[in-house]
């Protein structure tokens, strides 16, 4: 296997830059540049020199990690250099000149950690989400996954599943006069399947990652675009007195109190006057139906049915509009009146759709495999024959193996690890 290297910290200039080398020749290459390596997991100050010309490259901290007790499961050397561009380029260039070393591909360090059994696929997915996290809730959820929270839960499920499989296999081998599934085994199977189903009912990672879709809707000239601009703090939508100004929807990603949302302005809902506006109105109608949270700026009596709706009495600063109807929030995009209560209400509703603090949120792939396992276990519990029950439990074990990456995941690996940056 090749020995790989890359800059693992941010691009220079910086105070310190970290360059990692991983693979069978990592220690040899590190010693050629640093003269000698410290004891494993110990930092030491070394002069870094070109192995051929002996030109001084930098004075840096050097760390050594021995296989298999390293992040990748391989021998690793880290150089903590000064963070100037010239320093980093000289060290990377020197590593590239050593035979058997090459620059790493994006995500290759983490992929090696997965392939060498240091992490499973769920932890790799959590690490990818952690790198991309932009809000506090995203960070906490990704960290719970990256630290092995789901892996540990899966291990507990697998232990129970193996026990059930062993019981069924024992009955096949020894209970020659009884080919039916024991009632206690069926109950335990249903109990495990019910627990898996409960996990599938939890809030999913997609909403946490992509943001809660908050749609601002209402008739033309209701103040939708002005409200979006006021919340976003910048002019993102065109505002005029002409009805139908907004022809297409406008999306603004935001974080409200650490909650990721996508605020969406829509075309005014009315009978369209031309073909272009008709398309915008149709899209707006679809967005209203798909909204996680609906902010309605029209007549309260005309509001569509929605389980999470906030009725807004817009333009509250204008004469005759100071009193909001019952159940509506008075808001002025000009003076800022009512904006804070509105944002608090949006965040409150959005949180009901997100996992709790530190909770594990399943992504679509993970949920699909857990669903497969639950279905297979339910089939085993309902089977009248031991052989069919054993096959159902075997299928459930295979689903868990695909969930953790032990089998049948080659099609997802390239897509996953391409999300990582160089040096990770």
Image (cartoon, rainbow, N blue to C red):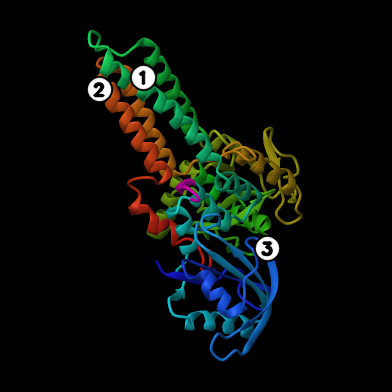
- Seen from the viewer's position, the closer of residues 176 and 370 is 176
Q: Is residue 34 above or below residue 319?
A: below
What secondary structure is marked by label 2? helix
Q: Which residue is mark 1?
A: 167
- Rendered residue at 25%/9% (across/down): 178
Indicate which label's residue lies in the foreground, 1 or 3. 3
Q: Which residue is mark 3?
A: 42
- Seen from the viewer's position, the closer of residues 80 and 144 is 80
Res 309 quadrant in image: top right
Indicate which label's residue lies in the foreground, 2 or 3. 3
Assess whether mark 2 and mark 1 are in contact (beta carbons under 8 angstroms). Answer: no
Query: How far is mark 1 from mark 2, CA to CA?
Result: 14 Å
Instruction: Please report the bounds of the magenta region as a residue range.
Output: 118-122
Residue 388, labelled with which disc?
Answer: 2
Instruction: Let me know if residue 120 is in the magenta part.
Output: yes
Percent coordinates x, y for residue 210 in the rendering: 52, 51
Res 366 quadrant in image: top left
Query: How far is mark 2 from mark 3, CA to CA?
Result: 55 Å
Percent coordinates x, y for residue 276 in the rendering: 40, 60
What secondary structure is marked by label 1? helix
Query: How far is mark 1 from mark 3, CA to CA?
Result: 49 Å
The local crowd at label 2, few if under 14, some if 14 to 19, many if 20 or more residues have their Cα within 10 Å, is some
Task: State which tag comes first along the sequence, 2 or 3.
Answer: 3
Residue 410, labelled with which disc?
Answer: none
Task: State which tag comes first along the sequence, 1 or 2.
Answer: 1
Res 30 quadrant in image: bottom right
């Amino acid at each position: 296997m090749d020995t790989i290297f890359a800059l693992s910290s941010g691009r220079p200039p910086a105070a310190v830059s970290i360059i990692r080398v991983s693979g069978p020749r990592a220690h040899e290459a590190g010693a050629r540049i640093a003269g000698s390596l410290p004891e494993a997991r110990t930092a030491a100050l070394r002069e870094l020199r070109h192995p051929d010309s002996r030109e001084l490259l930098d004075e840096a901290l050097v760390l050594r990690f021995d296989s298999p007790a390293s992040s990748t499961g391989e021998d690793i050397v880290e150089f903590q250099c000064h963070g100037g561009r010239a320093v980093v380029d000289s060290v990377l260039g020197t590593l590239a000149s050593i035979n058997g070393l090459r620059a790493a591909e994006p995500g290759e360090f983490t992929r090696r950690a997965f392939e060498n059994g240091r992490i499973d696929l769920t932890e790799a997915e959590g690490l990818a989400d952690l790198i991309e996290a932009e809000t506090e809730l995203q960070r906490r959820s990704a960290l719970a996954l990256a630290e092995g929270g789901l892996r540990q839960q899966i291990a507990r499920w697998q232990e129970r599943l193996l026990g059930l499989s062993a019981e069924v296999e024992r009955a096949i081998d020894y209970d020659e006069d009884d080919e039916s599934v024991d009632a206690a085994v069926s109950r335990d199977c249903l109990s495990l399947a019910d627990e898996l189903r409960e996990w599938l009912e939890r809030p999913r990672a997609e909403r946490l990652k992509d943001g809660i879709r908050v749609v601002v809707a209402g008739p033309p000239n209701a103040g939708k675009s002005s409200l979006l601009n006021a919340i976003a703090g910048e002019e993102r939508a065109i505002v005029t007195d002409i009805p139908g100004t907004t022809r297409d929807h406008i999306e603004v990603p935001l974080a409200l109190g650490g909650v990721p949302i996508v605020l969406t302005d829509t075309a005014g809902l009315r009978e369209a006057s031309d073909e272009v506006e008709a398309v915008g109105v149709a899209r707006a109608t679809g967005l209203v139906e798909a909204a996680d949270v609906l902010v309605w700026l029209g007549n309260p009596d005309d509001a569509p049915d929605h389980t999470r709706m906030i009725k807004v009495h817009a333009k509250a600063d204008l004469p005759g509009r100071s009193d909001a109807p019952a159940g509506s929030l008075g808001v002025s995009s000009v003076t800022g009146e009512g904006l804070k209560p509105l944002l608090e209400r949006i965040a409150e509703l959005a949180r009901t759709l997100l996992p709790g603090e530190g909770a594990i949120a399943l992504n679509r792939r993970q949920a699909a495999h857990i669903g497969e396992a639950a279905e297979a276990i339910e089939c085993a519990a309902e089977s009248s024959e031991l052989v069919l029950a054993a096959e159902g439990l075997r299928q459930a074990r295979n689903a868990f193996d695909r969930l953790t990456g032990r089998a049948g995941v080659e099609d997802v690996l390239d897509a996953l690890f391409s999300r990582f940056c160089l040096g990770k």
